[in-house]
Amino acid sequence: MGAEVSKPPVGFSRRRFWLKALLGLAITSGLVLFLVRYVDWHHIAALSRSANWWLLASVVPLYVVLYIVRAERFILLAPGTPFSVMFCITAIHNFMLRVLPMRTGELSYAFLVRRAGTSGIGESLLGLFLLRLLDATAVVLIFVAALAIDRTTYRDDSQLALLIAGGVALVGALTVLFFRQLLSIGFVTFAGTLKLLGLTRYQRIASVVEKLSELIRSYTRLTPRLILAQAGLTLVMWVFNFVIVFAMMRGFSVKVSFVQAVLGGTGATVTGFLPIGGVGTFGALEAGWAVGFVLVGLNKSLAVATGFGFSLVTFVGAALLALASWILFNRLVARPETPQIAPEVGNGS
């Protein structure tokens, strides 16, 4: 009986995917058409002529280093995974985020780790939840630190900027340190709400709640040391990510400071966290980039042009790395020495 209840209607998942894809395509098309209105094609031609293509090409090896840090973050969540396998998973996962609609690319990480035999889908998705929380905290911390450095942002009121930086740093640190407790409180609240509404009398919902309870009980065994290690790697990753943004802007011969690169690049980063990014990050990334750099002083045409340039260069780099990683991943997971037993969550400290 349980098997019948859990079985989805024929074609339901496929229809839902195509609905998301069509909605994502509509969002992307609308954003791109809106942005194209501000594009000065003569400006873009001049920008391409003055671009430092060697500096732009250097972004690809920089992204390799960035992927190494990302892979190390994932390994802390699935410590039985060989680095070579996790690097491939990282590259494929990042590319899937760029092309699949409504952030459904996140699921690729869970499926690939399960295929590698080092973690289950539920544990992997909870791990991604932790990483996205850490990502948001790190980006806010770096952004506010940049505000504190750039005194002109608050009309020379550096005390206000430092006060905001200190407040956000405190909130971020407390969130990371008490992540396990907050996760438990959130689940208890969620389960209690479902019970209050009488939804747990349905077998499917009750089964999902029970599975979530088991996952969270095991996940709360994550040690503070492991969470702090994740936080440190996350901070390093995002600082390096903004170094890439800075290198890209200089490659386009746009003279911005590193602080301006952080403040402007945060716009693209924030839109990347949202589940309304259309098809992958297309459209939303360029829109966030344009808004961010307009706020730091670039004119609209230049901000939009560099946004499209950033998207194109990083997409090509991500595609090349993903293709090579997919080929290597299939060879690696076919080897008998690849671990096939998922380790217990929390043993990676």
Image (spheres, rainbow, N blue to C red):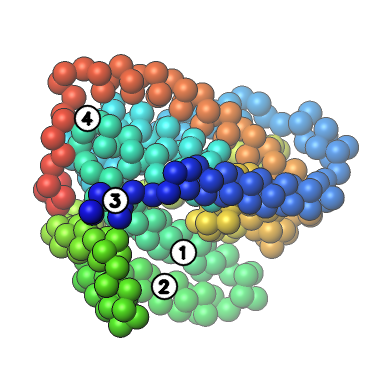
- What residue is pinned by disc 1? 140
**Residue drawn at the location 37% of the way across and 60% of the way down:** 133
- What residue is pinned by disc 3? 4
- What residue is pinned by disc 2? 168
Q: Is residue 304 left or right of residue 42?
A: left
Identify residue type, mark 4.
Pro
Residue 15: % across, % down: 53, 46
Q: Is residue 248 left or right of residue 45?
A: left
Quadrant position of residue 66: top left
Q: Which badge, 3 or 2, is on the more N-terminal residue? A: 3
Marks 2/1: CA distance?
7 Å
Residue 82 - label:
4
Residue 22: % across, % down: 64, 46
Residues at discs 2 and 1 in contact (Cβ within 8 Å) = yes
Marks 2/4: CA distance?
36 Å
Question: Dot 2: what SS?
Answer: helix
Marks 3/1: CA distance?
45 Å
Q: Which badge, 2 or 1, is on the more N-terminal residue? A: 1
Q: Which badge, 3 or 4, is on the more N-terminal residue? A: 3
Residue 12 - label:
none
Callout 2: 10 Å neighbours few (<14), some, many (20+)? some
Residues at discs 2 and 4 in contact (Cβ within 8 Å) = no
**Residue drawn at the location 72% of the way across and 52% of the way down:** 31
Identify residue type, mark 3.
Glu
